[in-house]
Image (cartoon, helix red, strand yellow):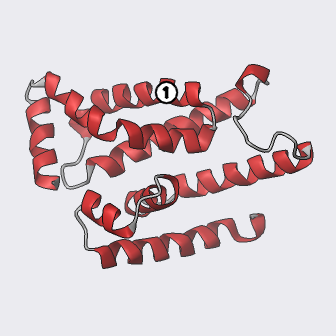
Amino acid sequence: MKQDEHELIRRIRNGSTTEYEVLVRRYQSAVYHAIYQVLQQAAEAEELTQEVFVKAWQSLDGFNLQSRFLSWIYRIAINTALSHKKKEARFLHPEKMPEQEGQGENPHQQMVQKEREGLLHEAIAGLKDNYQVVILMHYFEQLSYAEIATELDLPEKKVKSRLFDARRMLREKLGTQM
């Protein structure tokens, strides 16, 4: 799959711009879910998903064909979502409050939970791409080890190893903050 994807990217770079839609369709759901996990706001996630694909399009010439496109676009998605969240944090928009099930929870508990989620997302965004992607795919996309292995063209054992290492790195980064 990696070879096919890289060939597709080469063709897009060489002027076959209509083929970019193949990449959009392939990764749109994953990008949306990654952004939604950060923002917890469907409309914002939809809007930023489009923005991520525009950014990816504009930066496609800088994409390293030694990397996986999914890793690269996940990094763009998470960084875009975190940047948006920081900008939005300066203003309180009641109409953009997170979509939560526990509306009856104590406001202090909700605030603490949001703070923890923010710390977690920032820590994930700080991981190297290969670790970040497996964490996002497993915990946010709810993919199995086998599905991740297939998507990333890796042995399942390598996926398990990366998840183990990524969890360890997150524990070290977050320390007592969680």
> At label 1, which amino acid type do we have?
Glu
Name the residue located 34 percent from the left edge and 47 percent from the top edge: 72
Q: Residues within 10 Å of mark 1 (few under 14, many from 20)?
A: some
Task: Name above or below for residue 59 compared with residue 120.
Answer: above
Is residue 93 in view? no
Residue 40 vertical position relative to residue 117 in the rendered view, above or below:
above
137 and 176: which one is in front?
137
Residue placed at 20% from the left, 29% from the top? 20
Q: Position of residue 100 (x, y in %)?
A: 72, 40
Could you say where residue 92 lies in the image, as x and y percent from the top left? Answer: 79, 24
Q: The N terminus appears in which quarter of the rendering?
A: bottom left
Identify the residue at image location x=28%, y=28%: 57
Residue 151 can be seen, yes or no: yes
Q: Quadrant of residue 104?
A: top right
Q: Secondary structure at mark 1?
A: helix
Residue 132: horizontal and vertical position, in percent?
Answer: 45, 58
| Label tally | 1
Say if 102 sits above or below 171 in the image.
above
- Image point 20% across, 33% down: which residue? 22
Which quadrant, please, contains the C terminus?
bottom right
The image quadrant that residue 54 belongs to is top left
Q: Which residue is mark 1?
A: 46
Q: Quadrant of residue 19?
A: top left
